[in-house]
Amino acid sequence: MPTKVMLDFICDYIDGELTTSDETSDVIWVPKSEVVEYVTAPAMLFRFKNVLEFDGRIHYCSYVTKPEFKVISSRFV
């Protein structure tokens, strides 16, 4: 498994419409309180929870996904 750098961003909605694409057949707006119910991959769930709990500090994490998801480090910088 190659090493990757993953960055997550928090944005504010300004305008626009949701649209499907060749890669995405369905798109929906989901309330923050319900978003984790739609995420099944452990690494994505971990990242989404970090975004939802954002308190202004940068959260640095490292993890592996194979053979199973495991957090290696988690700290604030």
Image (cartoon, rainbow, N blue to C red):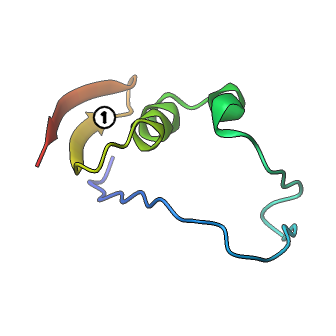
Amino acid type at circle 1 is Val
- The residue located at (80%, 77%) in the rendering is 16
How far from the left and from the top, in percent, is residue 74?
19, 33
In-front residue for pair 48/14: 14
Res 19 visible: yes
Residue marked by disc 1: 64
Q: Is residue 13 above or below residue 61?
A: below
Horizontal and vertical percent position of residue 60: 20, 46
Q: Let me know if residue 39 appears in the view.
A: no
Residue 19 vs 61, above or below: the answer is below
Give percent across and percent down for residue 11.
Answer: 53, 64
Seen from the viewer's position, the closer of residues 54 and 70 is 54
Q: Residue at x 76, y 43 (%)?
A: 30
Residue that sits furthest to the left in the current view: 77
Residue 26 lies, in percent from the top left, at 88, 54
Label 1 sits on a secondary structure element that is strand
The residue under the point 36% across, 60% down is 7
